[in-house]
Image: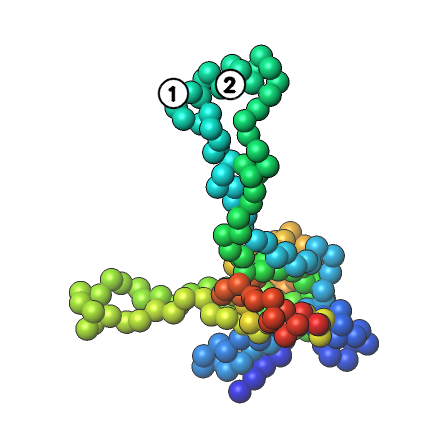
Amino acid sequence: MSRIIGVPHDDGISDAFKVSITQNMGKAGHVTVVGYLTEGSSVALSSIWESPFQGDHIGAIQALDKAVKVYQWQSSETLKTQANSASIWEGTEPPQIPLALYFHAYTDAKKQVNDPLTVLKQMASPELAEVVPVSLDDAIIGREPQDAIFDIGRRIKIKMRIHDVQYDLNLPKTNDGYFAYQTVTLTASPKGMINRSQIPQYFT
């Protein structure tokens, strides 16, 4: 079973300006949320660099430290070297992808705007047991927030987890109480970092 909600496919707008987010919702089957890609969407890839030699020099010995500082103050000479500023790579974080998705009610405000809001929140949420089990044998296993497949403008296709979902509560609504339009901001990232050789698989 599969279901597609959000902006319609026959709106005359290219898929290059849309984002599709698909997740297995259990009994509801695979659900896909489709929204327009708007300003505020980006990709951030960050590495962690440290300077482990920053404080290392001959004058760093505690007994000499103050004397060396006084000498540097008086002479404007220093015992520090270029090696003190050397950076060592410590790792690369998973890419962070903030997205701003716009939804508009063409014919059905519930299906095209409100349902996507509900499903995106479900995609970002866990499913946990209500009580602490007495023993492991009695434990009901919970599930952490699950991955979803993101297809961003037909150029980025990657499995990610949604970290947060935000939208404005004070926007125009229909007579039925559904939003007439809505912009949802969310941040997603894959579970782990991506190797250099894997980049072309996800970002084309």
Ranked by sequence position, the earlier of labels 2 and 1 is 1
Residue under label 2: 69
In the displayed structure, 174 sits above or below 76; it is: below
In the displayed structure, 85 sits above or below 160; it is: above
Name the residue nearer the viewer: 96 or 29: 96
SS state under label 2: helix
Name the residue nearer the viewer: 134 or 8: 134
Residue under label 1: 63
Name the residue nearer the viewer: 166 or 176: 166
Instruction: Report the quarter where the C terminus lies.
Output: bottom right
Q: Residues within 10 Å of mark 1 (few under 14, many from 20)?
A: few
Asked whether, in this view, residue 200 is left or right of residue 57, the answer is right
The picture places residue 7, in percent across and down from the top left corner, at 70, 72
The picture places residue 13, in percent across and down from the top left corner, at 80, 73
Query: Which residue shows up at 50% across the image and 64% down it?
Result: 192
The picture places residue 125, in percent across and down from the top left corner, at 46, 64
Query: Which residue shows up at 50% across the image and 52% down it?
Result: 90
Q: Quadrant of residue 84?
A: top right
Mark-to-mark CA distance, 2 and 1: 12 Å
Name the residue nearer the viewer: 45 or 52: 52
The picture places residue 92, in percent across and down from the top left corner, at 54, 57
Q: Quadrant of residue 31?
A: bottom right
Asked whether, in this view, residue 36 is left or right of residue 120, the answer is right
Q: Amino acid at mark 2?
A: Lys
Query: Which residue shows up at 73% across the image and 60% down it?
Result: 38
Query: Which residue shows up at 47% across the image and 34% down it?
Result: 56
In the displayed structure, 128 sits above or below 75; it is: below
